[in-house]
Image (cartoon, helix red, strand yellow):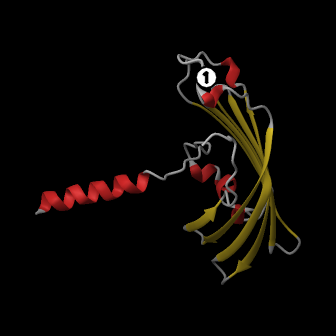
Amino acid sequence: MKSIKNIFGTLFLGGLALNANAQQDPMFTHYMYNTLSINPAYAGSRDALSITALHRSQWVGFDGSPTTQTITMHSPIANKNIGLGLTVVNDKIGPVNNTSLAGQFAYIMQLNRKSKLSLGLSGGVNILQADLNSLSLDQQNDPTFQTNLTNRVTPNFGFGAYYSRERFYIGVSTPNLIQNQYSTIN
């Protein structure tokens, strides 16, 4: 009886994957150093101007290996109830380079002496540059590689919430509210 449940469970989960869509966001080793890229509500949470620059290289020595650079800057303004931020992310994998520029706005509420809750919005653009013609293909008539994607600019919006205390924080966010289509081939 247990094996029948396992078989049906596996078939059910496999059936869910038949209509799955994927996206590749940049991979970060330490999210705690790159919070603003993921959650716009983090803007202005440090009570000072904060600037962070990160670089990540994966599979060093392989041609086309993934590299990611991130620069974030954020600060509280006015009476410290508003935070503003700016994020620039450059992610390169093989012939594809994806650069995103985003601005963040956060409204910060002091819940009590030790805790804050902030809600944030982000808006920006993704710039996709791909030189698919530079790839060596085994099958030359693959329709996916017949057109060369060059410079696609698409909008991006996000939302987040961030709760923090002296020694604890938790956040939830949706950094990509818009589903962008880069290919016309389905």
Q: Is residue 76 above or below residue 150?
A: below
The quadrant the C terminus occupies is top right
Give left or right: position of 8 versus 61: left
Which amino acid type is shown beneath numbered disc 1?
Answer: Gly
Where is residue 145 drawn, in percent x and y?
64, 27
Q: Is residue 151 above or below residue 177?
A: above
Looking at this view, name the residue that lies furthest to the left: 1
Total numbered badges shown on the rendered structure: 1
The quadrant the N terminus occupies is bottom left
Where is residue 67 drawn, in percent x and y?
63, 31
In depth, the one of 4 and 29 nearer the eye is 4
Q: Which residue is mark 1?
A: 64
Where is residue 59 drawn, in percent x and y?
52, 25
In depth, the one of 124 and 110 nearer the eye is 124
Q: Quadrant of residue 6?
A: bottom left
Residue found at x 56% / y 67%: 170
Q: Quadrant of residue 11?
A: bottom left
Element assignment for label 1 = loop
Give left or right: position of 60 versus 127: left
Where is residue 181 drawn, in percent x and y?
69, 47
